[in-house]
Structures are given as structure tokens and as C-alpha cells.
Image (cartoon, rainbow, N blue to C red):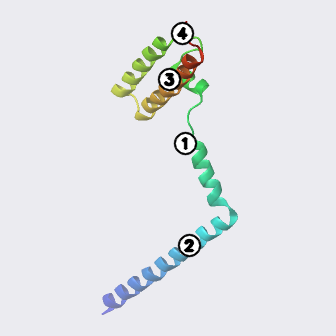
Amino acid sequence: MAAKVLANVLVMGSAIVGRAVLRAYQQAISNASKNGVANEAVKNIRRASKIMAEPEARQVLGVTERASWEEILQRYDSLFERNAKNGSFYLQSKVHRAKEVLEGAYAKKAQRTPDA
């Protein structure tokens, strides 16, 4: 009999606590939207997802501004393979993004300088 009463108290108590947590969460969301915290968080997420800058890409690949496209590809292949074998996926991703950024930069330079 005591076990049944204790089980009922536990079930009812957990339901009450669950509802209270849900209400507190809803109130926190409401307060955050009123204060603009949600908008700031979205802005920070967008800012973090921006494309890598060219100087950062050069730093990741370890090349200078005077490096030829062949040198960049050699560094890319070397770093990409090294991180594929025993590195991290994060670094491999950074190397790939750096190559993409520099590829775009070199394509723009090629369009600006017509071959004679």
C-alpha cells in the first residue's frame, strides 16, 4: 500500500515539475525575444558562417601572395591528404575552404588580366 502511494506521489510530482520546467522555458524564450537576444544570436550565427577571407586562406595553406596556382595546389593536396589520413575533419575542411577562396581569387585575377 505504501509503495502504491509513493509511486503516485512520484508520478504526480514529476508531472508538476515537468510542467513548471516547460513554462519556465516558454517564459525564457518570450523574454529573449522581447530583449532582442534571439536576434543577436541569429546575427552571430550568420557572422560565424561567412566565407573565409583571402589572407586567412593563404595562412591556412601556408602560401604567400606571390605563390603560383601550382604551388597552392601542391600545398592543398599535401595538407588535405595528411589530414585525411591522420588529421582532423575540421582541419581538412579548413584546407578545402581555403583552396576554394583562393581559387575564386585567382579566377578574378585571370579575368582582370587578359592574355596577350
Where is mark 2, residue-wise? Answer: 26
Badge nearest the viewer, 3 or 1 = 3
The kind of residue tagged 1 is: Ser
First reached walking from the N terminus: tag 1 or tag 2: 2
Q: Are marks 4 and 1 in contact (CB under 8 Å)?
A: no
* Towards the viewer: 115 or 14: 115
> Does dot 1 land on a helix, a strand or a loop?
loop
Q: Residue furthest top?
A: 116
Q: Residue at x 53, y 27 (%)?
A: 101
Where is mark 1, residue-wise? Answer: 49
Q: Residues within 10 Å of mark 2 (few under 14, many from 20)?
A: few
- Residue 103's tag is 3
Q: Are marks 3 and 4 in contact (CB under 8 Å)?
A: no
The kind of residue tagged 2 is: Gln
Question: What is the spatial separation of the Cα atoms under label 1 and label 2, in whole angstroms?
Answer: 28 Å
Percent position (x, y) of residue 9?
40, 87
